[in-house]
Image (tube, helix red, strand yellow):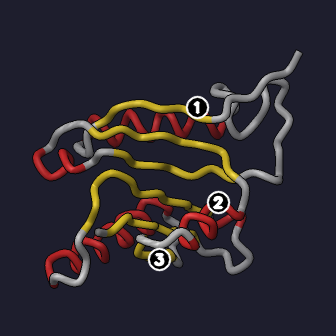
Amino acid sequence: MSYQLDAVTFQADMGPEGMAKTAEIWGDIGSGKLPLMFASDGTFNPALMPVTEYTDYETVQSGGPITVTIRMVSPEYLKNLEAGGGFRRYETESAAGSIEECSLAAWEQAQRDMAAGSLNIDYSFAVESTVPAQYAPDGKAHCTLLVKSR
């Protein structure tokens, strides 16, 4: 009998060790070792997409751990979150095809807005959706980051 997980939750810091742990988990998800994107029998569900949720992540400023959840959602998930209000959207792309570059650029945009005083982050929740270059029509990696604001 085949099974598929809805989400994987773990704690990590944003230093090199935490980033390596996160990359390892994403590798296990992409390979099917963790049956999140693929069911245990290897079946892929094209109706769902993975997102990364960050909760209670204020400790990232001091190097503390944050809670990370990688979850499979419908394409409407981000739209529904935004419709509820209270989020700032950041969209980035990488012509080099680097998801890491996209993600970092989105978070840097949010940091610049915070420094400029135009964003007051509510560190209780943020969600990030990345699209690898090989799945994007334009051949670029894409990132959408929704940051909850106060």
Circle 2 or circle 3, nearest the eye: 2
Residue at 59%, 43% in the rendered image? 71
Of callouts 1 and 3, the N-terminal one: 1
Q: Badges 1 and 3: C-beta atoms under 8 Å apart? A: no
Residue 134 x/y as whole percent: 69, 64
Residue at 53%, 78% in the rendered image? 95
Going by the image, does 23 lie left or right of 70?
A: left
Q: Quadrant of residue 59?
A: top left
Q: On the image, numbered disc 2 is attached to which residue?
A: 77
Q: Quadrant of residue 88?
A: bottom left
Q: Which mark is residue 28?
A: 1
Q: On the image, numbered disc 3 is attached to which residue?
A: 92
Residue occupying the far front of the picture: 84
- Give the residue type that dot 1 points to: Asp
Other-residue count near label 1 (Cα within 10 Å), few / some / many at <14 / 14–19 / ≥20 = some
Of callouts 1 and 2, the N-terminal one: 1
Other-residue count near label 3 (Cα within 10 Å), few / some / many at <14 / 14–19 / ≥20 = many
Judge whether 21 appears above or below 94 on screen: above
